[in-house]
Image (cartoon, rainbow, N blue to C red):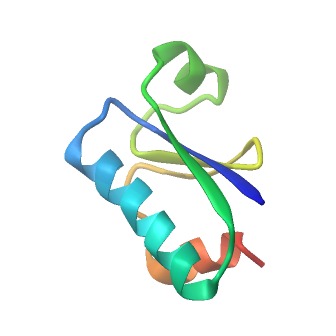
Amino acid sequence: MKEIKVLGSGCSKCIKTADFIKSVARELDIPVNVVKETSLEVMMSYGVMSTPAVVVDDVLMHTGSIPDRNTVASWFR
C-alpha cells in the first residue's frame, strides 16, 4: 500500500489534491493511505516552500500545485 502525505495548511487546493489522489487510486484499483499533514515542522523537514506538496512513501514528489492525472498515476507504477 502506498503511503501518501499531502502537505499544506488545509487550503482548498490541499483538500482537492488529497481527494484527487484518492480518486485516481480508486480508478486504477491501487490501495493507498492518504493523510493530510498541516504541521509546519513536517513541511520544513521535507524542504517544502510552496503547497500543496505531495510525499509518496517518504519521498517528496510534487510541490506548488494540484498535480495532473498522469503525474499522480505515475506514482502508482
**Residue at x 57%, y 74% (from the top left corner):** 25
Classify the position of the N terminus by image quarter.
Answer: bottom right
Instruction: Looking at this view, name the residue that lies furthest to the top.
Output: 41
Marks counted in the figure total 0
Instruction: Looking at this view, name the residue that lies furthest to the left.
Output: 12
**Residue at x 31%, y 49% (from the top left corner):** 15
* Side of 70 relative to 77 (left or right): left
Classify the position of the C terminus by image quarter.
Answer: bottom right
**Residue at x 47%, y 17% (from the top left corner):** 40
**Residue at x 54%, y 26% (from the top left corner):** 43
Q: Is residue 13 above or below residue 69?
A: above
Q: Position of residue 75 (x, y in %)?
A: 69, 69
Q: Position of residue 35 (x, y in %)?
A: 53, 42
* Side of 52 relative to 75 (left or right): left
Q: Is residue 22 above or below residue 48?
A: below
Q: Position of residue 3 (x, y in %)?
A: 70, 50
* Side of 64 relative to 37 (left or right): left
Q: Position of residue 4 (x, y in %)?
A: 63, 50
The image quarter in which residue 31 lies? bottom right
